[in-house]
């Protein structure tokens, strides 16, 4: 039996931890011991219920909003959360090293956990990465982690150098210094990419294996409002500007289901009617996708991918650069449109275009036809087997 640390350091939401849980179930069946180190303990409480695992809180460092800069490349992204400051980075890496030293794992599986990657390197613990394409960027040295084209090549390389200096300061004399930021990602023994190649944020053309999306089954069927016509499902986040989208959806006259955590009670009243209903919790996303004519998302990777597998087009309203990168993949494929929350007219135009132009649905169905034989459970079991080989695990 091998002992595996499963780490999740950055990002928010159940989309990070649920795929880890699904892979953990197979690894536990194989007889391995798992210790989770998680960013969000409340998410862990819900997601890991019923699993025979121990879970702990990840080391964290706080940063002020004014420390944030633009995010045009991956080095900027990591710099924004403290990696550019050797003192802050040292604190999180030291925390991870302390946990790893106490736990003495044989290997680690990491989801968006760059501090843990450095700690594993320093502690000589083999690790693998899991996540969608954004959280497992291609490890090519040049160009590395380009998020937008607003930085010149010189500026981007400067960001890489600053980050590399900080990382190597933390590594010190414990191990050989890294020669480029991308080398940190090349240290991974295996990338378990939970996406499809066509949906990859970085549009990589290397030989990385994509495992498809892993979404847990929820045995609750959607209950649609009565009425004829096309159906709309929207998964939104309560924040300034979303009220205009909710008002727009409530006026379509089409059967509409909305899941928008944070908009509850009296705040739903202006938007609820016979055709527009709010969900109190998640339901079967596969059935939702199959029964909908349109999905409205903030660039949610897994939910959108499930709609693509059902051949259903989507309207994307991204909130962050990661979501914008993903939304652009959908638009490039001809299976959706993009607008931001401060562009209500463009949102309305996008929804009208998708609902009236059959080309969007045809594009989504081409993707669905390509992956009609995709089996999530087979993909998870194959990933577990590959992980055992890559990390040298033995049950």
Image (cartoon, grey):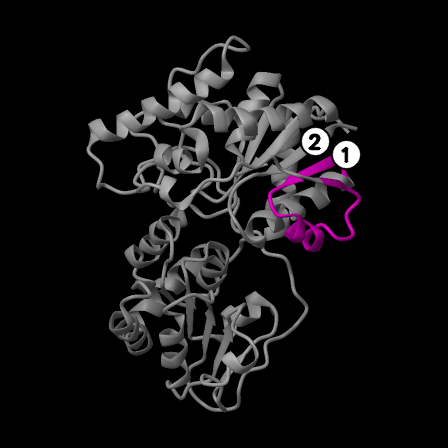
Is residue 259 positioned above or below 55 on the image? below
Quick check: is 34 in the magenta stretch?
yes
Q: Residue at x 36, y 80 (%)?
A: 248
User: Which mark identifies residue 278?
Assistant: none
Magenta segment boundaries in residue numbering = 30-55
x and y percent of residue 63 in the render?
46, 40
Please give the name of the residue rendered at 55% of the width and 53% of the height, measured from the top-left corner: 13
Q: Is residue 145 left or right of residue 386?
A: left
| Mark 2 to mark 1 CA distance (whole Å) | 6 Å
Task: Using the rendered view, name the quadrant where residue 9 is placed.
Answer: top right
SS assignment at label 2:
strand
User: Which residue is labeled 2 in the image?
Assistant: 4
Decide which of 395, 224 is in the foreground and name it: 224
Tell me: 340 left or right of 108: left
Where 359 falls versus 161 (above or below)? below
Mark 2, Cα crowd under 10 Å, few <14 / some 14-19 / many 20+, is many
Give above or below for 359 relative to 78: below
Where does the N terminus fall, quadrant-wise? Answer: top right
Q: Position of residue 91 (x, y in %)?
A: 55, 27
* Count of marks, rendered view: 2
Residue hosting label 1 = 33
Q: Is residue 375 visible?
A: no
Q: Are marks 2 and 1 in contact (CB under 8 Å)?
A: yes
In the displayed structure, 30 sits above or below 304; it is above
């Amino acid at each position: 039996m091998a002992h595996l640390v499963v780490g999740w350091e950055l990002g928010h939401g159940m989309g990070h931890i649920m795929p880890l849980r699904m892979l953990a179930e197979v690894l536990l069946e194989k007889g391995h011991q798992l210790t989770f180190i998680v960013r969000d303990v409340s998410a862990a409480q819900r997601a890991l219920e019923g699993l025979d695992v121990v879970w702990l809180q990840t080391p964290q460092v706080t940063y002020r909003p004014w420390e944030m800069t633009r995010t045009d490349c991956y080095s900027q992204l990591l710099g924004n959360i403290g990696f550019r400051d050797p003192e802050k980075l040292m604190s999180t890496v030291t925390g991870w090293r302390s946990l790893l030293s106490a736990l003495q794992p044989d290997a680690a599986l990491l989801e968006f956990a760059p501090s843990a990657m450095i700690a594993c390197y320093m502690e000589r613990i083999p690790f693998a990465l899991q996540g969608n394409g954004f959280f497992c960027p291609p490890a090519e040295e040049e160009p590395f982690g380009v998020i937008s084209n607003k930085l010149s090549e010189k500026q981007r390389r400067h960001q890489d150098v600053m980050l590399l200096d900080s990382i190597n300061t933390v590594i010190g004399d414990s191990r050989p210094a890294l020669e480029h930021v991308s080398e940190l990602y090349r240290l991974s023994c295996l990338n378990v990419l939970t996406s499809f190649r066509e949906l990859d944020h970085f549009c990589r053309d290397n030989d990385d294996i994509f495992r498809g999306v892993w979404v847990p089954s929820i045995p609750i069927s959607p209950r649609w409002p009565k009425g004829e016509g096309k159906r709309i499902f929207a998964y939104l986040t309560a924040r300034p500007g979303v009220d205009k989208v909710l008002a727009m959806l409530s006026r379509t006259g089409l059967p509409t289901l909305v899941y928008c955590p944070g908009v509850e009670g009296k705040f739903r009243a202006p938007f609820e009617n016979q055709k527009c209903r709010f969900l109190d919790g998640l339901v079967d996303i596969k059935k939702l996708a199959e029964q909908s004519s349109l999905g409205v998302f903030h660039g949610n990777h897994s939910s959108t991918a499930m709609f693509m597998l059902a051949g259903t087009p989507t309207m994307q309203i991204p909130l962050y650069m990661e979501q914008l990168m993903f939304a652009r993949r959908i638009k490039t494929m001809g299976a959706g449109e993009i607008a931001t929350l401060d562009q209500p007219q463009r949102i309305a135009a996008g929804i009208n275009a998708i609902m009236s132009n059959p080309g969007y649905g045809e594009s989504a169905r081409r993707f669905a036809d390509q992956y009609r034989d995709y089996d999530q459970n087979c993909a998870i079991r194959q990933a577990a087997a590959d992980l055992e080989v890559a990390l040298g695990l033995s049950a």
